[in-house]
Image (tube, coloured by chain):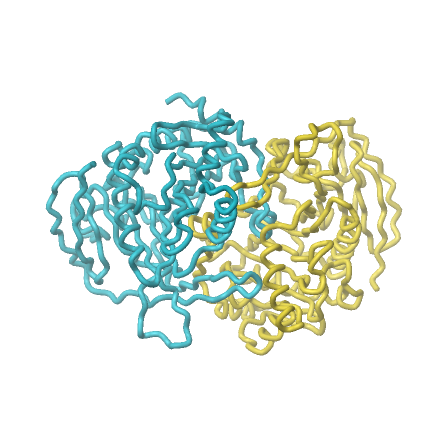
Chain colours: A yellow, B cyan
């Protein structure tokens, strides 16, 4: 297994920060910014028309919005400007989000309020302000994966968390408010609408066949062949048969595993290779950094763990240079997706990118 | 009842076009553009992870994209450039979409293909290239409503249509590819994912209470009062209790009705007043034209007609001047919405706009 050292420290306002290093570095930097109280949890409301929960986090409206590089809160602290990371360098760092959508319970709120409980963390991929997940070297990428595994394990232990969601938004086109390469972890006090739906379908498939759905899907993709983008001994990347976005890639371990917490070292060690390749291919399609949402689907903490398989869904909103795919009327209001590009065609374009 | 005359004609490629006029105008203009075959229907694929249908309409990739005003295909035909509307003026015009996501069945496709059946129409609100639905006068707005009613009635008769969806995307921020004021009608060969969910919740509520869900919601909004934006004798407009977007307004007839087809003249005649007011208030919040998706939820054609009530959902993606709300990781991949603005606060802002 790759060596990864975790150092746990506290930030100026009591938030936890974790340094992940592939070498035995000592991390002792102190966050000396003046104390500020943390925001109270938001509340949750049930959408009566759908039964879905909406989290109201009004304190997030004032969060940092595309600051210039010298005021980037995700850079290491090198000048008088205290960033979120007190050390002057780091490899991978994870900390609690300063403007969280979901937080630990508070007894300062009225009993009538349904608190938006959970935990939101920021995963900073590198101390370099430029670049992205795909531009990390393999060791570095493996350290990020170690952080995802560690955080999934730890957050899953919180009694009020039902689901841990690891993701990365890349590009201002998908609403990124900080350009520094980073991802996020949201954990929810409920199972999200999409996961409920996927869980039901996966359970039905398992009841019928005894096989996890993702395993059957991978078998079909290998049989069809034409939508595969890349594979190695432990992972496969493909454009799904019914892709929703012009460039959508799913990446899954070949052997079923419910979440990061249960990923073996061998499979984890084989991830950076395919991840780098897939993200390079994505940027190569139009030779511009591709805006995307990269979402890790994991089984919920307490249910569906035999039927719901870990996989990475990368969806790009770019359909051509200068043209984005928007979620307009049909997608946004009805949940009915219209695709302009055949999945087999986008898979071919991705395979044809010269690396 | 307001007088509305409908004239049905054919376009150069056989598509139907309907003129709607509030005065008895003769419409005889002939579309003299050279014949071109219409695209074959796209196909539909089932997303194995969710059981949802995705429509693949690869011919749409080449559709018109923000053409300059003199090449606007929705303007009336005044020069040698033949637009979609052959007449040199019109009030409201509806025609079959040239790049439809859903079309009538074709026997030119392989038997194995699941055709994306249905009908997509474009509703042009005015022959003026500038403006929007909210800037129409009341008579004109009533003519648009007459067109929506007529088209819903007619399209509902198609044996392969399960649901008729009337909507308007406004603003390049939500992906509008033509700036001329217009809306669209999509009709689907299935019940859309969101409607299935709403239908289940509404049925459950009806079984429990004997009251349509939308009626109970309106009663609650009237009781709470603080989220109401406007009302008249027949309609009410409110920010929903669990809004998903910074500025979201629902507008519903006070007496339950499943869809446009069953709207009475009296209720229809009272619509333009509240529609104009709500859209003016929306533009007034930041004193800029507000980008929005305005979606009419209607009961499906063949089911849920006693429990699912017609209402208009207007969602704006703007959360502040210069800032948009994006559907990023949590919303897009998990369907879990985070709201930065309290619904009561946005309702107050909307009420406070000076008209």
Q: For this rendering, which residue is in front, A102 or A110?
A: A110
* Count of numbered badges drawn on the protein: 0
In what quadrant of the picture does the C terminus of chain A appear?
Answer: bottom right
Q: Is residue B125 above or below residue B138?
A: below
Quadrant showing the N terminus of chain A: bottom right
Apparent side of residue A245 relative to residue B146 in the rendered image (left or right)? right
Residue A282 on image: x %, y %: 57, 61
Q: Quadrant of residue A266?
A: bottom right
The quarter of the displayed image where residue B162 is located: bottom left
Question: x%, y% of residue B220?
Answer: 50, 32
Residue B71 visible in image:
no
Left or right relative to B135: residue B199: right
At which x and y percent is residue B349? 48, 25
Q: Position of residue A121 (x, y in %)?
A: 72, 44
Q: Is residue B305 above or below residue B312?
A: below
Residue at image point 44% right, 45% down = B174
Q: Nearer the viewer, residue B194 or B88?
A: B194
Q: Is residue B161 above or below residue A348?
A: above
On the image, which quarter does residue B107 sit in? bottom left
Residue B88 seen in the current view: yes
Q: Is residue B143 left or right of residue B166?
A: left
Residue placed most toward the observer, B313 or A142: B313
Instruction: Name, please, the residue furthest toward the bottom.
Output: A223
């Amino acid at each position: 297994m790759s060596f990864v050292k975790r150092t746990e420290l506290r930030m100026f306002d009591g938030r936890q920060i974790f340094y992940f290093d592939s070498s035995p570095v000592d991390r002792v930097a102190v966050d000396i910014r003046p104390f500020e109280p943390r925001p109270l949890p938001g509340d949750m409301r049930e959408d009566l028309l759908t039964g879905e929960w909406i989290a109201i986090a009004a304190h997030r409206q004032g969060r940092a919005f595309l600051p210039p590089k010298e005021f980037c809160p995700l850079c290491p602290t090198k000048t008088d400007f205290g960033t979120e990371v007190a050390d002057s360098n780091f490899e991978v760092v994870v900390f609690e989000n300063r403007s969280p959508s979901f937080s630990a319970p508070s007894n300062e709120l009225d009993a009538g309020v349904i608190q938006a409980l959970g935990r939101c963390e920021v995963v900073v991929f590198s101390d370099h302000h430029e670049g992205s997940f795909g531009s990390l070297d393999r060791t570095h990428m493996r350290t990020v994966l170690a952080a995802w595994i560690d955080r999934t394990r730890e957050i899953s232990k919180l009694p009020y968390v039902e689901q841990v969601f690891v993701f990365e938004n890349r590009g201002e086109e998908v609403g990124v408010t900080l350009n520094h390469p980073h991802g996020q972890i949201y954990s929810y006090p409920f199972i999200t609408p999409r996961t409920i739906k996927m869980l039901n379908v996966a359970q039905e498939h398992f009841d019928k066949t005894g096989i996890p759905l993702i395993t059957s899907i991978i078998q079909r993709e290998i049989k069809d062949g034409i939508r595969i983008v890349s594979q190695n001994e432990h992972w496969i990347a493909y454009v799904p048969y019914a892709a929703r976005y012009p460039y959508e890639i799913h990446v899954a371990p070949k052997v079923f595993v419910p979440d990061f917490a249960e990923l073996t070292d061998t499979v984890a060690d084989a991830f950076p290779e395919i991840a780098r390749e897939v993200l390079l291919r994505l940027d190569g399609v139009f030779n511009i950094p591709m805006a995307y949402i990269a979402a890790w689907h994991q089984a919920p903490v307490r249910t569906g763990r035999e039927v719901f398989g870990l996989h990475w869904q990368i969806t790009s909103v770019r359909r051509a240079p200068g043209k984005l795919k928007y979620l307009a009327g049909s997608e946004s209001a009805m949940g009915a997706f219209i695709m302009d590009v055949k999945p087999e065609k986008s898979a071919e374009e991705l395979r044809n990118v010269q690396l």
